[in-house]
Amino acid sequence: MRELDINFPTCPVRNILSRMSDKWSLLVLRALQKGGVMRYKDLRNAIPDISQKMLSSTLKRLEEDCLINREMHKEIPPRVEYSLTETGKELMPALVMMIEWAREHFDVITGQQSMP
Amino acid sequence: MRELDINFPTCPVRNILSRMSDKWSLLVLRALQKGGVMRYKDLRNAIPDISQKMLSSTLKRLEEDCLINREMHKEIPPRVEYSLTETGKELMPALVMMIEWAREHFDVITGQQSMP
DNA sequence: CCGTATCCGCGGAGATACTG
DNA sequence: CAGTATCTCCGCGGATACGG
């Protein structure tokens, strides 16, 4: 099927991959996998160098893409909890594989980088 | 080990992942997996909407990161052949898993997108 | 506590032209 | 054939301040 050829610009699979290719999505997903149900503040603590803006926009995007759940508790003070959806959980094995691969090979890759 | 915690900015694993997170790297790697040894022109044909500039810079980056081999034949006209390194090949199972995941779930994700 | 709003700089990325 | 060089645009992402 032509539309599912990943090398074509209109391919939905490719569009999804490009959506994961931002700076923070994978880190947020990984944090939620490790932490289970997490509040906004928990995520900020888990990823020390993410800004409020980028955390907000990343969460919003992931929610739109059905990768995470957002549950708003109307309390004072407000409490908002995030967690992986089933679709999100199903992505994790692939993500974990990539992390494992990076863990095994970073010495080769970064070693080459330090050469002039 | 603190330095290998993916949530810390200095984590080499994280740095590597961020390097894969550009627009074209994964597509080039996938093309090379399917095509084996490929010339520059082959890659342009395989990925119709990549520009010369981005193909060049992506190939250069991937070579620096030891993910692909570049073999230059000094002929007239010149012939340059690209292929995956062992490190690159070892990444492919994870990448293929992500593609399969996207193929299974794109209907859910993009379906949600079209809602107002 | 959980976010928006606004401003702004930098580099990713395209278009086009040129070279060994 | 296999690339550089140059110019330009655009939006990601950071910093900061403010709102429910």
Image (spheres, coloured by chain):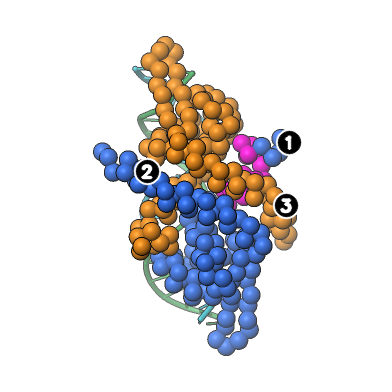
Chain colours: A blue, B orange, C cyan, D green
Q: Position of residue A53 (x, y in %)?
A: 49, 66
Which residue is pictured at 42% across the width and 48% down the height?
Answer: A104
Number of marks in picture: 3
Residue hosting label 3:
B107
Which residue is pictured at 57% across the width and 28% down the height?
Answer: B35
Q: Is residue D15 left or right of residue B32?
A: left
Q: Is residue A74 left or right of residue B12?
A: right
Element under disc 3: helix
Amino acid marked by disc 2? Ile
Residue hosting label 1:
A1
In the image, which is nearer the foreground, mark 3 or mark 2?
A: 2
Question: Dot 2 surroundings within 10 Å: few (below 14), some, or many (20 or more)?
Answer: some
Q: Position of residue A15 (x, y in %)?
A: 62, 47
Which chain is indicated by disc 3?
A: B
Up-down relation of residue B80 to residue C14 (above or below): above
Up-down relation of residue A84 to residue A6 (above or below): below
Q: Residue furthest bottom?
A: A76
Is there a contact, CB below 8 Å, between mark 2 and mark 1?
Answer: no
Numbered range of the magenta stretch: A6-19
Q: Is residue B78 visible?
A: yes
In the image, which is nearer the foreground, mark 2 or mark 1?
A: 2
Is there a contact, CB below 8 Å, between mark 3 and mark 2?
Answer: no
Residue B73 occupies quadrant: top left
The Cα atoms of the two marked residues, 2 and 1, are separated by 36 Å
Q: Residue furthest left?
A: A116
